[in-house]
Image (cartoon, helix red, strand yellow):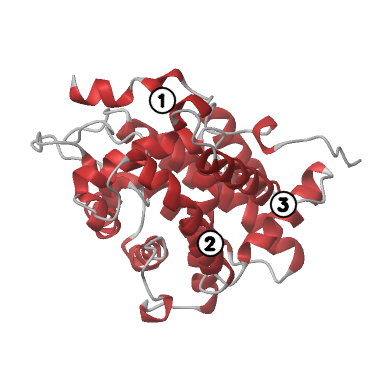
Amino acid sequence: MNADSSIQLSQLPSSRSPRAVAAEVAKVFAYHYPAGHARKVSRNFSYTKRLFVGKIPGYRSCNTEYHNLAHTIDATLACARLVDGYNLTAAPLPERVVLNLLRAALLHDTGYIQEEWDREGTGAKYTAVHVERSVQFLEKNRGDLGISKSDVPAIANIIRCTGLSVDLDSIPFTVPEEKVAGCILGTADLLGQMSDRAYLEKLLFLYYEFKEAGIGGFDTEFDLIRKTIDFYEMTRKRMTDAYLNVSIYAQHHFKKRFGVDRNLYMECIERHIDYLGKIIEDDTTNFRHKLKRGEWVHTYAQRLNG
């Protein structure tokens, strides 16, 4: 494919069209594995979508606006892209490992979903324990998800890799490739959220999720905005070290499939961080006036308190 140096991540399939993302994940999967086997992921994709919109009996719809369906979809697509890039440059990951990885991506934030009886607050109150709650959701609903009992431990191990403080050496991976899959999901989780076009605006949602969860260190919305630069440095180090630098495989994917020899995820994230630095330095106006994507930026706090 001829290179198009002007292409941006936002021009490619994204969470704005869940159906397009599901098709893209199946397409990328079929580059390396039997296309028909992607139906297993499609089933989980449909289930996850219905769960987040409140169509699964016994569960409320997702009410966390940062860790929502859009984020889950973006993280799953990032996983597929990283797998493709990895397989283009190394011995391909076993199909079963990849299927379990994609299932883990779709389920990794189900821990934010409240059960029907749980009417107090939002799912944000589970922030500190959402990873293990996601594993519990997997264990409880594996039958409806079409997941065999033998695959549950592997999927659980991969989900646990999304915990930002978890030591991956403490996770009992069954095969080395499973750890690679965990690193891919941990990286995709970060790439998916931080490359979102409205990432800076959505930090306001994250602030209120942290506030409900009782997570300290952020006294105001602007405090979280300001500390996000430090968070980026921390996550970049985690991606490089703990997550085995698998983020580089995104560039191999974009080069092969779109003719773009660039890591579009990292480019997008670095633009966000550069702009964030300018917001922090400019004290002439309220920082909200410099967040352009989404009118809800100016009304979210009022809606919460109203």
Disc on res. 233: 2
Disc 2, SS: helix
Where is residue 7 drawn, in percent x and y? 78, 35
Instruction: Measure the alpha-carbon separation of dots 2 and 1.
Output: 25 Å
Task: Tell me which label, 3 or 1, sits earlier in the chain.
Answer: 3
Instruction: Measure the alpha-carbon separation of dots 3 and 1.
Output: 29 Å
Where is residue 204 drawn, in percent x and y? 37, 36
Residue identifier under label 1: 297
96 lies left or right of 104: right
Front one among 139 and 238:
238
Q: Residue at x 47, y 46 (%)?
A: 40
The image quadrant of residue 98 is bottom right
Q: Nearer the viewer, mark 2 or mark 3?
A: 2
240 lies left or right of 51: right
What quarter of the picture does the N terminus occupy? top right
Which amino acid type is shown beneath numbered disc 3? Asn
Q: Residue at x 29, y 53 (%)?
A: 134
Task: Tell me which label, 2 or 3, sits earlier in the chain.
Answer: 2
Q: Nearer the viewer, mark 3 or mark 1?
A: 1
Instruction: Measure the alpha-carbon separation of dots 2 and 3.
Output: 18 Å
Which amino acid type is shown beneath numbered disc 1? Val
Residue identifier under label 3: 263
Task: Tell me which label, 2 or 1, sits earlier in the chain.
Answer: 2
Q: Residue at x 56, y 46 (%)?
A: 277
